[in-house]
Image (cartoon, rainbow, N blue to C red):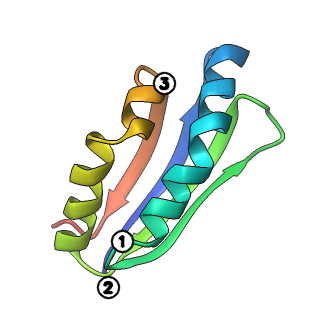
Amino acid sequence: MGVTLNGFLRCASESEADRVRAALPEHVRLTRAEPGCVRFDVVPTDDPLVWTVSEAFTDPAAFKAHQARAAKSDWARDTAGIARDYTIKGME
């Protein structure tokens, strides 16, 4: 079944949204290149401060490896404090 994460990245200001737009392309590129990444999409919505997030990884180990890499990345530093509203399935 794998692991999926779905939800939203919600910026509180245009300044936060600018940080997301600047850091997102490299974050997407690096994540899609990770072993076990099946899908990784972060797509703007009609609201310029909100993105939908949809991820799929082959198994919990691949998802955990992604989370560990992302936690130490420029993306984590550049988007610290921006609200995430995610539902994760498949980690049971």
Q: Is residue 85 above or below residue 34?
A: above
36 is higher (above) or lower (below) than 30:
below
Q: Position of residue 83 (x, y in %)?
A: 47, 27
Q: What residue is shown at x 62% (from left), y 51% (from top)?
A: 25
Side (left or right) of 81 relative to 69 = right
Given the image, on which type of amino acid does mark 3 rest?
A: Ile
**Residue to which mark 2 is pinned:** 1
Q: CA distance from mark 3 to mark 2?
A: 29 Å
Which callout, 1 or 3, points at the residue further toward the start of the chain? 1
Secondary structure under tag 1 reads loop
> Callout 2 environment at 10 Å: few (<14), some (14 to 19), or many (20+)?
few
Q: Judge left or right: residue 10 versus residue 43.
A: left
Q: Earlier in the sequence, mark 1 or mark 2?
A: 2
Quarter of the view holding residue 71: top left
Say what secondary structure mark 3 lies in: loop
- Residue 73, percent across and down? 34, 42
Q: Quadrant of residue 51?
A: top right
Position of the C terminus, as image quadrant, is: bottom left
Image position of 90 (left or right of 17): left
Name the amino acid type tagged 2: Met
Residue annotated with mark 3: 82
Instruction: Tell me what residue is drawn at x 27 percent, y 52 percent.
Output: 69
Q: Which residue is mark 1?
A: 34
Q: In front here: 87 or 19? A: 19
Q: In the image, is residue 24 above or below residue 56?
A: above
Report the amino acid beneath label 1: Glu
Foreground mark, 3 or 2, reads: 3
